[in-house]
Amino acid sequence: MINRVRGTQDILPARFTDKTDAQIECWNLVEQTARDAFRLCGFEEIRTPIIERTELFERGIGTETDVNKEMYTFEDRDGERVSLRPEQTASVVRACIEHGMFNQPGLAKLFYIGPQFRRERPQKGRYRQFGQIGVEVLGQSDDPAIEAEVIEMLDWYLKQLRITGTELLVNSIGDENCRPAYIERLKEAIRQRLPQLCGSCNQRYETNPLRVLDCKIESCQPYLNELPVITDSLCEPCRAHFQSFTAMLDQRGIAYTLAPRLVRGLDYYTRTAFEIIGSQLGAQNTIVGGGRYDGLSQMLGGPPAKGFGFAFGIERMIMSLPDDAARSLKQVPDVFVAYIGERARKHSFELARRLREAGISAVVDLEGRKLKKSLAVANSLAARYALIIGDSEIDSSSYVLRDMTTGEQRNLSESDLIATLRN
Ligand SMILES: [Zn+2]
Ligand SMILES: [Zn+2]
């Protein structure tokens, strides 16, 4: 037997699994709700390839990040280095550059839904292929109204999914004018605490000191609390931008918490950074992360352009759903058609076609089972009704419709049948 690759998962119809994050109903709910919510704000979908040139991510993400180290990279037959995408922002920006999308008037407001790949150490709730949904706003404006609107949209999305008890954390991580001086101050302060800090903090001190602030190790926390925060080092334009952004959140009635130690893991982020954290997932409780990335287009060889966006893992979003979220989504057939005899079997296929033309989902027994076994299948599919057809039903043009929940049976003409099933 050949099993699936480690760290990947099969997404099954709910009746075949009790793992909620592997139920297709949950995936469809999270994806369809995103399409609906984003469309209301004028966002358009973009699809980019799963494989890209490795160079795209090396330039866009940097070679010293965790994400880069976890990439699936291989050499193609012609010697080109390609990678499975570990995230999609760099791909979206590449597509915007490649197709001249920055030349259009106004903003490109885009969203994507698709798998991403990271070769992480196997751990519970982490997959090497995981689903991600993201939103990117690209163009020439960095108006904080873009940030407030995107966050309001996200807030609306979470409400549609009935995810409550979340907290919005916001911060500004400065820009190329004010961040270098802050990083020097930060490094100086970290240097004095290196012996007390964990191994990964020591490593990050060398490669990406901002990310020391991100350390989740318990013993590091007291020392991290002493480190200088970037909010005290912002230049005037960054400070004004951040103030304007939070004022717009206030205007929209969106609650937030200032989180001066919040940073993003990727090098290209500037100014506004945010996270939405949930109450249900324990220590690793970030549900959504996002921020501004004004330098990315140029870093990838494109024109100067501003960018702001967010992304979230679909598995994590599913874990945050209320328990009964998927129940209402089960894809159950409206009617299961069972029959007695060869003539009724033929008639069933024709009737099923007419039901489907009327928009009713009809499943016919394809295995020629006896009535009793046929009804057992209808039960396991959780069909709302079963239709029972024999010779006398065909002759009288009257069908027996059985309510599978109550067991109640009724005789109906075809037009009454269609009217009943449509309700
Ligand atoms: Zn640490
Ligand atoms: Zn600044």
Image: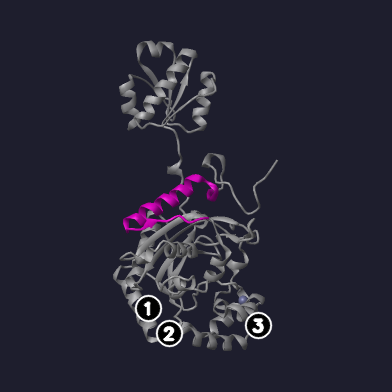
Percent position (x, y) of residue 3?
A: 67, 45
Foreground of the two, 113 or 381: 113
Magenta highlight on residue 40: yes
Foreground of the two, 74 or 113: 74
Respond yes or no on whether mark 2 lies under 8 Å from ligand 2: yes
Indicate the amino acid at tag 2: Leu
Percent position (x, y) of residue 151?
A: 38, 65
Respond yes or no on whether mark 1 lies under 8 Å from ligand 2: no
- Whether residue 324 appears in this view of the structure is no
Quarter of image, res 224: bottom right
Mark 1 — residue?
242
Which stretch is magenta? 20-49
Indicate the amino acid at tag 3: Gln
State how far apart marks 1 and 3 are (Cα). 33 Å
Residue found at the far front of this picture:
78
Q: In which quarter of the image is the C terminus?
A: top left
Look at discs 1 and 3 and give the one toward the viewer. Answer: 1
The answer to which of marks 2 and 3 sits earlier in the sequence is 3
Mark 2 — residue?
234
Mark 3 — residue?
196
The answer to which of marks 1 and 3 sits earlier in the sequence is 3
Q: How many residues crowd around disc 2 within 10 Å: few (fewer than 14), some, or many (20 or more)?
A: many
